Amino acid sequence: MQFKIYLLSFALLLCGILFTRVQAQSSVCSGEQICLTLNARGTIQWQQSADSATWTSASGINNDTLCLVPTTSMWYRAEVVEGTCDPIYSDPVWVEVFPGVTADAGADMNLCEGDSVQIGGSPAGSGGTGPLSYGWEPSAGLSSVTVSNPMASPNSSTSYVLTVTDSLGCSARDTMSILFYQRPMVEAGADSAIDCDSSLVLGGNPSGSGGTGSLTYSWTPGGSLNNSFAANPVASPGVTTLYWLTVTDSLGCEGMDSVLVSLAGQTTGTQTFNFTGGVQMFVVPGCVDSISMDVYGAQGGANWVNNVNYGGRVMAKFAVTPGDTLYIYVGEQPAGLTGGYNGGGNGETAGKGGGGASDVRQGGQTLNDRIIVAGGAGGGGYWSSQHVVGGLGGGLNGGDGYRSAPGTPGGQGGTQTSSGTGTCVSLNNPSMAGGFGYGGSPSGCGCEGYGGGGGWYGGAGSGNCRGGGGGSGYTAPGAANVSHNTGVNPGHGKVIFTW
């Protein structure tokens, strides 16, 4: 912007006689030009002064117009000499320079189709005399044209101009450009149904096009693909799967598409595992991703037809992977002193052993690999016209054993964290305890002795003609549809799979 100030208009009639018209003060924004104009005869020399007392020549300019871009406030006047007359001076003019305003529209950038970006510097405006106001143009694609840092989402390449203005009207401008790029077009292929254990080539022809430069591919989930970074990988899903394809160009612009691969005729079935005295194995069929398990612990040993020391029952549903091997241990109801297979404790003299637990193991065959356990019951019988009651198999917790009434206690049932104690001459005798995966066994206790049932933790055994405790049940974290029942299964245990 240029300002013109007419300082002086006069006619030189006699030496020292001057008629003047003077504008005494003006102002200019930093960085802008101002022009001072004088209409006079003679030789003109412009002068400047910081204090209106000491004057120096202004850039040697000696015509009737002084144009300059001042950086500081200053006094200005003209010295006029004609012939042999003494110099005469125009009235001084004070030119005030307002502080400069700076605008920063931000750096140029690339933008992918559909994205938004915040524009403007940090800060977008500075300097000047506050407050500052902001104006952006054009308005297309901007969240606001009057804020310092609007969000921009243009649909074509656009140059945005920022004008920053202070309270005195001083302003500055800056420009930034957004280069707009189309995203790649993506074709993941048509939704399809395939048979179990079949494969399918994913993607289109082509799977990606457009965009800028070379394209890269990424499929998720990638576990059932032969190459998750190929344009057309081979999928061999074991379950119905939704695959996502992301195509990225050389500028980082991405496009996405999905394809659903359904499995037709997924395998369903059921299988029952009865007591065999050894571990049994089950390989998860293809396309099966979960199995419902119904597990029964064994009844404890019994020497009376009316003994009801039944095993526990646990039901739950577990996630599985096709091809995995599950290990099944089915508990035994013992016929004599020896405890039942899979954790039953031994009895002594005329007593009976405890029943074995039933469980399923995943990932290995140790006790820590058990994912579901149904507790076996404690041994029970009949002594001196009295019912020796074996503790019921669990469930979460096994039942306590006793004789005739709970006030004549025998072995305590197992819990989620311990086995409990039993009776051997003295009550609450810890030597009768079982442990992790096995029931306790009485020894040298007198009268008839009965073993504790196997379980997550086995029940305690008991002597003195008192029943052994039942073992506890268990389900691993992550199980669904969990149900625990105590004392429901007579005879040997069993395990039933349904999928």
Image (cartoon, rainbow, N blue to C red):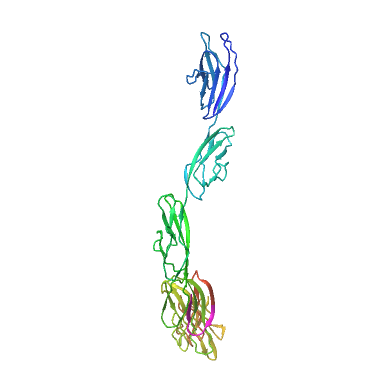
Q: Which residue lies furthest to the bottom in this view?
A: 385
Image quarter of residue 233: bottom left
Image quarter of residue 90: top right
Reply yes or no: does residue 493 show up in magenta: yes
User: Looking at the image, which is closer to me, 312 or 117?
Assistant: 117
Magenta: predominant secondary structure element?
strand
Q: Does the image show residue 303? A: yes
Q: Which residue lies furthest to the front in this view?
A: 205
* Residue at the (57%, 22%) spot, across then down: 5
Residue 394: horizontal and vertical position, in percent? 52, 78
Image quarter hosting the N terminus: top right
| Number of numbered markers | 0
Reply yes or no: does residue 477 show up in magenta: no
Q: What stretch is highlighted in magenta?
A: 485-499
**Placement of 146 over or under 492, stated as above or below:** above
User: Looking at the image, which is closer to me, 217 or 96?
Assistant: 217
Residue 382: horizontal and vertical position, in percent? 52, 89
* Residue at the (41%, 81%) spot, across then down: 278
Residue 224: horizontal and vertical position, in percent? 42, 65
**Placement of 177 over or under 366, stated as above or below:** above
Q: Does the image show residue 52? A: no
Residue 327: horizontal and vertical position, in percent? 42, 76
User: Looking at the image, which is closer to me, 179 or 375?
Assistant: 179
**Placement of 23 over or under 465, stated as above or below:** above
